[in-house]
Image (cartoon, rainbow, N blue to C red):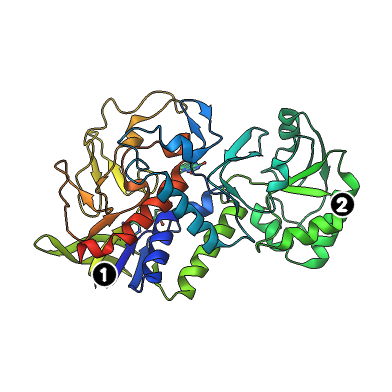
């Protein structure tokens, strides 16, 4: 079948790869690059419920209400989905499991559970005896704050990545560390400055490629762990790049920088989507569409000045259409608005309030689906991948 996938976050990338592996002819269309490259470069399944950190995500999934995106999928299929994604990304970039969360330090010195992390990070899960080393020129890692909150000692190294540059980013350092000569100078400076501690915590900039950190660790001669910094995050970009490489290698056609603006339908079946490309609109025909455009944060769901909530491509029915009363005053409180979204049936098709498919061949995946406050629960990546596989595996249903 000709499948169009809309979106290039964890849901769209996973859906495209799963569908092409099943033998479909897949075209992925995305206006932007999606959530992986803004992420910590880890894969969260479920890390927090009712203000408590979760140790066993798959066990906790059983306690979620029926409206939650995981509820219709179940722990076994969630396990299968995230293991599938971790395998496709590869052990050079992701290790761990959804059985137990790893607990890793953040850039401000809090401890954060996650199911899968990069090999360059996991030494930090084995101890709490840290030494923190920051880079003077890289303002995104507040080494003293981090060390203070972790009860560790900190030190700085003074090592510009490029002469004369006033405001280097994480990517500047990650690219510079691909140069073996610079990587050796970096490692030697860290080895000299690092205070005592079982694991040296370093900014998450240790190369754009998966294995670069090992050379740095071996040269330092002590255990190290990367700590992801603010977006765009280098470890997140590594995950994104690995998934994009996988879909390209599998011959998914990728149209990036173009927004899906509408659709064409024949009765209860979609026949294609309309895409804004270079100042005009072009139609791509499809036998089925997997809609993975994210939620409010990606602009897929919109609230207008009257508080009316809409889904912007297909005008899909939502669990609520009025934002009034769904926004609480404090950013840190739960925001019921973010639970608003599209309902899906057991095959992943978008359904109306009577549980009937809106179109027989329109599937949804990721943040567009109602029922979770993903960034509070840390369930966004797991729900994106699990619902993507449900949609791709359900494609035969709409044929
Ligand atoms: C501040 C913040 C912090 C978060 N922290 C965490 C966390 O710690 N752990 C966690 O698990 N989750 C977290 N999340 C949630 C996580 O980022 C999302 O759940 C995840 O990215 C959802 O993946 P997705 O593929 O559904 O959507 P997205 O990653 O949002 O991707 C959507 C894609 O669709 C594209 N798109 C949108 N509309 C169109 C269109 N009309 N045409 C073509 N393309 C379109 C976008 O460009 C993008 O590529 C956080 C989210 C936010 C906002």
The spot of residue 7 in percent (x, y) is: 37, 58
Vertical comparison of 79 with 49: above or below = below
Which is nearer the eye, 390 or 15?
A: 390
Contact flag, marks 2 and 1 (Cβ < 8 Å): no
Q: Is residue 153 left or right of residue 30?
A: right
The spot of residue 131 in percent (x, y) is: 81, 39
Vertical comparison of 253 with 178: above or below = below
**Residue holding disc 1:** 280
- Which dot marks residue 365? none
What secondary structure is marked by label 2? helix
Nearer mark to the viewer, of 2 and 1: 2
Looking at the image, can residue 164 be seen? yes
The spot of residue 184 in percent (x, y) is: 84, 61
**Residue holding disc 2:** 189
Image quadrant holding the N terminus, namely bottom left
Q: Residues within 10 Å of mark 2 (few under 14, many from 20)?
A: some
What secondary structure is marked by label 1? strand
The spot of residue 299 in percent (x, y) is: 34, 48
């Amino acid at each position: 079948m000709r499948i169009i996938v809309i979106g290039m976050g964890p849901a769209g990338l996973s859906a495209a790869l799963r569908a092409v592996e099943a033998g479909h002819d897949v075209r992925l269309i995305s206006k932007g690059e999606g959530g992986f490259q803004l992420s910590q470069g880890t894969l969260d399944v479920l890390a927090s419920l009712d203000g408590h950190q979760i140790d066993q995500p798959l066990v906790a999934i059983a306690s979620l209400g029926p409206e939650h995106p995981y509820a219709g999928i179940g722990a076994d299929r969630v396990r299968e989905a995230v293991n599938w994604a971790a395998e496709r990304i590869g052990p050079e970039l992701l290790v761990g499991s959804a059985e137990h969360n790893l607990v890793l330090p953040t850039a401000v010195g809090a401890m954060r559970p996650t199911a899968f992390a990069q090999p360059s990070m996991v030494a930090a899960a084995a101890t709490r005896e840290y030494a923190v080393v920051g880079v003077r020129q890289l303002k995104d890692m507040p080494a003293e704050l981090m060390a203070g909150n972790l009860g560790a000692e900190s030190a700085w190294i003074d090592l510009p990545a490029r002469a004369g540059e006033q405001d280097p980013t994480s990517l500047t350092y990650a690219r510079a560390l691909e140069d073996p000569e610079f990587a050796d100078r970096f490692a030697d400076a860290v080895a000299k400055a690092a205070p005592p501690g079982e694991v040296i915590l370093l900014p998450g900039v240790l190369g754009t490629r998966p294995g670069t950190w090992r050379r740095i660790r071996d040269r330092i001669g002590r255990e190290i762990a990367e700590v992801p910094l603010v977006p765009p995050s280098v470890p997140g970009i590594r995950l994104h790049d690995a998934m994009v490489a996988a879909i390209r290698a599998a011959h998914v056609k990728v149209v990036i920088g173009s927004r899906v603006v509408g659709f064409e339908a024949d009765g209860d079946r979609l026949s294609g989507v309309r895409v804004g490309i270079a100042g005009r609109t072009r139609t791509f025909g499809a036998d089925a569409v997997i809609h993975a455009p994210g939620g409010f944060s990606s602009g897929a769901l919109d609230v207008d000045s009257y508080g009316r909530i809409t889904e912007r491509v297909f005008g899909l029915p939502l669990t609520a259409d009025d934002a009034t009363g769904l926004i609480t005053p404090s950013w840190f409180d739960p925001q019921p608005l973010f639970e608003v979204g599209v309902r899906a049936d057991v095959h992943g098709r978008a359904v109306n309030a009577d549980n009937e498919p809106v179109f027989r061949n329109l599937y949804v995946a990721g943040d567009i689906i109602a029922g979770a406050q993903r960034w509070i629960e840390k369930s966004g990546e797991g729900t994106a991948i699990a619902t993507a596989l449900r949609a791709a595996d359900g494609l035969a249903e709409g044929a």
